[in-house]
Image: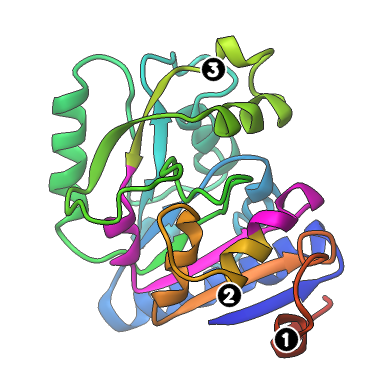
Amino acid sequence: MEIIISRDAEELGKRAAEQVAEALNEAIESQGGARLLLSTGASQLTTLSELVKKDVDWSKVELFHLDEYVGLSESHPASFRKYIKERFLSHVDVKKAHLVDGEGDIEENTRKLTEEIRKAPIDVALIGIGENAHIAFNDPPADFDTKEDFIVVKLDESCKMQQVGEGWFKDVDEVPAKAITMTVHRIMQSKKIISCVPYKVKAKAVRDSLEREVTNLIPATILKLHDDWTLYLDEESASLLDDKYRAQALFESI
């Protein structure tokens, strides 16, 4: 585990994007292509805005993302398919994008995604941490045992409140009850995991994820078991960390 603390979200995004691009280029050079897994949400915006500027042969990159609401139209402002298309795919031409579709035949949609993601490992996974310490939509208590790749989950109230707080929905009642999410098991199979977690609202989740034992009640704690995990924080999200963790962190500016 490596912890990198930047001054603010903008600096964090620049630094994280550099590492992602470097890892993608290494994978392309060594194996002829790369597989990238993206998170969505407000915390990922600065990283994605910098990543699309990087010198990467995107025609050799295959893209996946983590989750999507069940029954939500792609035209809705909160749709993660819409998010990925507008903030990433409209800027770079990837080899292929496998988008999580929460409309229509959910079972068939997840079957196709499972078939594609099992073809080869994910080289670089951008995995955010939610305000309730979820990863993807694996809210607490997260299923650490399933070996499925995508499952349908019921969203908890704190997760719904985060979506409202970030401005994706007008109120909690508008947030869909369920979502398709990549499982914890599949996320942990990624070769490299990079977590970009800025902003004060994430400070408690960051502290709990680092300072508590691994538990499905704090899903992000499992990331500490990954062999190659880098956690990018800004001063706000790192503000509640114990001195032990701040002492081992790298403080970087661009």
Q: Going from the N terminus, do you reach mark 2 or mark 1 first?
A: 2
Q: Residue at x 44, y 40 (%)?
A: 137
Query: Do labels 3 and 1 touch, CB within 8 Å?
Result: no
Q: Quadrant of residue 27?
A: bottom left
| Residue type of the residue flagged with mark 2 | Gln
- What residue do we see at 50% from left, 24% from top? 79
Q: Position of residue 25 (x, y in %)?
A: 45, 75
Cα separation, mark 2 vs mark 1, equals: 25 Å
Residue under the point 57% across and 27% down: 160
Height in image: 173 above or below 47? Answer: above
Amino acid type indicated by mark 1:
Lys
Residue 175's disc number = 3
- Residue that badge 1 annotates: 244
- Is residue 76 depicted above or below 123 in this figure? above
Q: Is residue 187 magenta?
A: yes
Task: Please state which of the two labelled residues, at mark 2 or mark 1, is closer to the viewer.
Answer: 1
Out of 5 and 99, give the one closest to the viewer: 5
Measured in 3D between alpha carbons, the distance from the residue under mark 3 to the one under mark 1, in whole angstroms, is 38 Å
- Disc 3 or 2, which lies upstream in sequence? 2
Q: Residue at x 75, y 71 (%)?
A: 241
Residue on which the image places disc 2 = 19
Indicate left or right for 179 with 13 as reference: left
**Circle 2: is it few (<14), some (14-19), or many (20+) Cα within 10 Å?**
some
Q: Which residues are magenta?
A: 182-205
